[in-house]
Amino acid sequence: MSTWFLIIIYLAFISLGLPDSLLGSAWPVIWPEIGSSLGSAGIVSMIIAGGTIVSSLFSKRMVERLGTGRITLFSCFLTAVALLGFFIAPSMLWFIVFALLTLMFLSTETINRLLIKPTQGRG
């Protein structure tokens, strides 16, 4: 049982860190195909870094409400969506759209609406 748990932790760790390093190593091949410039990778990197900062600021509240397991699962899902989006993006505009979509889904209110049912009538 503990072996499977370690495998899941390892896969989650890899999947959450993959996009950051993958963009830098793949960009020299990507930018000519989408008609962009070499420096455009900085824009995508800043959007991804902004998403990381936003999610870090709200991480305590999200973990308290959803738990570590759900947050990790949802983060891995968003990572997969972002990588798939980067794969199918035909232009730099689509790279920015997919980066903004992942940033939008990192907001606390969006996660609350997706994963937590609203309470009926308070107090």
Image (spheres, grey):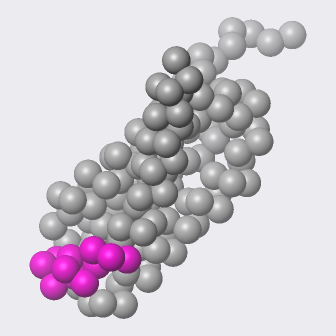
- Dividing the image into 4 quarters, which one contains the C terminus? top right
Whether residue 114 is visible, yes or no, is no
Residue 26 placement (x, y as % from top left): 27, 74
Residue 97, quarter of picture: bottom left
Asked if 78 appears above or below 39 in the picture, the reply is above
Residue 73 placement (x, y as % from top left): 49, 33
Asked if 85 appears above or below 121 in the picture, the reply is below
Which residue is at 46% across, 74% downward?
45
Residue 6 placement (x, y as % from top left): 53, 33
Q: In this view, does 56 lie to the left or right of 35?
A: right
Q: Is residue 52 magenta?
A: no
Q: Give the range drawn in magenta.
A: 24-34
Which residue is at 56% across, 23% downward?
2
* Foreground of the two, 45 or 117: 45
Whether residue 14 is visible, yes or no, is yes
Q: In this view, does 2 lie to the left or right of 20?
A: right
Dominant SS in magenta: helix
Q: Is residue 71 left or right of residue 12?
A: right
Q: Is residue 92 left or right of residue 114?
A: left
Q: Does the magenta stretch include residue 31?
A: yes
Which residue is at 70% across, 45% downward?
59
Residue 52, quarter of picture: bottom right
Asked if 54 appears above or below 67 in the picture, the reply is below
Instruction: Return the residue found at the far right.
Output: 123
Which residue is at 31% across, 55% downward?
83
